[in-house]
Image: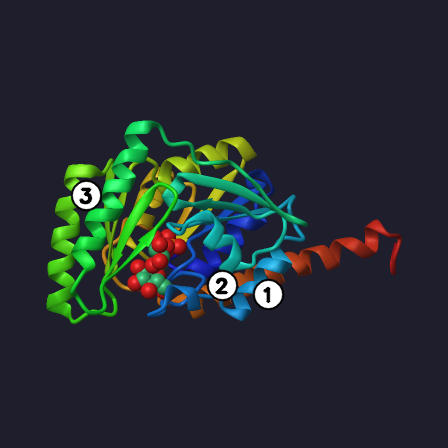
Amino acid sequence: MTDDPRAALLALVADPARRPVLLALDFDGTLAPLQDDPEASRVLPAAADALRALAAHPDRVRLALVSGRALADLHRLAEVPPGTVLIGSHGAERARVGEHGLDRDVVALDDDQAGRLARLGEEMQAVARGRDGVWVETKPAAVVVHTRLADPEVGDAAEQEALAVGARLGSVTLHGKKVVEVSVLTADKGAALVDLRDELGAGAVVCAGDDVTDEDAFRALGPDDLTLKVGEGRTVARYRTPDPQALALLLTDLAAALGDAESTRQPAAQGGPGA
Ligand SMILES: O=P(O)(O)OC[C@H]1O[C@H](O[C@H]2O[C@H](CO)[C@@H](O)[C@H](O)[C@H]2O)[C@H](O)[C@@H](O)[C@@H]1O
């Protein structure tokens, strides 16, 4: 078995027995380099071009973004091609990108969940209050405390308090990169990805991500799938690539390989030269 993710990826997608391959990609830190301001996050241009090219081969590859972002944010910022499935809020939200908008599921909270979400919002605002660089993001089923802009000791103290709030009020608490997210639902990226794979009848999954929540997705997959950690840090993923730029190159190579396969097939199918 190779340690080269490029060779493994191209071999997997070339195997007719594995079609279609579900290409499931995290957004922040994977397709989009991390930013101080989450509103500034965008898919790298080379990766965006590759995704558009890959979307032209739905018989070979299906695209999904699997993110912790609220679905509406993910759709607005990622600008992925029609046909792409968006999994947001770490699996709690899902939609498919259409030509004219989102075909989406709605998050339904019961009274207990809605009540805990409201209290989480209030208590997390109290955690951030008076701490420079600490701020709160609200999602349909979760509240997030961000500390990337804070001094390390200020951020660490805020994260510890946020974790304690999560232990009291949350169903799931995630401690990611300079972020504590508390959800009132029990979704995770792994369960959402397995559901999507089964629904699509995918022959294999390629999954890339950079943060601790992506480990849920890696763990949920099998030895015949391809898991790819982006960047440093402990992982259960089989392969590693250094950064989003390197991932964009892999996607570019994959799109080129599918394009080449298409262009070598077409002349014969259309009665072209040599037919
Ligand atoms: O699952 P992901 O697509 O990786 O989303 C995880 C979280 O991403 C965002 O926060 C992270 O990225 C920000 C922009 O680069 C960065 O400023 C922040 O420190 C990171 O934690 C997003 O704001 C969260 O809602 C997502 O859960």
- The residue that label 2 is drawn on is 250
Which label lies toward us, 3 or 1?
A: 3
Instruction: Identify residue type, mark 2.
Output: Leu
Q: Which of marks 2 and 1 is nearer the N terminus?
A: 1
Would you identify the image quadrant in which residue 192 lies? top left
Q: In this rendered view, identify the residue nearer to me: 204 or 152.
A: 152
Label 3 sits on residue: 166
Q: Give the CA separation, mark 3 to mark 1.
A: 39 Å
Task: Look at mark 1 in the image and give the residue it sits on.
Answer: 49
From what the image shows, is residue 36 above or below residue 15?
Answer: below
Inspect the image, locate mark 3, and give the three-letter code of the amino acid beneath it: Gly
Residue type indicated by callout 1: Asp
> Looking at the image, which residue is at 25% across and 39% down?
172
**Mark 2 in CB contact with mark 3 (< 8 angstroms):** no
Dot 2 or dot 3, earlier in sequence: 3
Image x and y of residue 76, in percent: 52, 57
Q: What separation in Å lies between label 2 and label 3 (alpha carbons)?
A: 37 Å
SS type, badge 3: helix
| SS type, badge 2 | helix
Q: Which image quadrant is residue 242 in?
A: bottom left
Residue drawn 57% across the image and 48% down it:
84
Q: Which of marks 2 and 1 is in front?
A: 1
Residue neighbourhood size for the residue with mark 1, other residues' Cα within 10 Å, grouped as few (<14), some (14–19), many (≥20): some
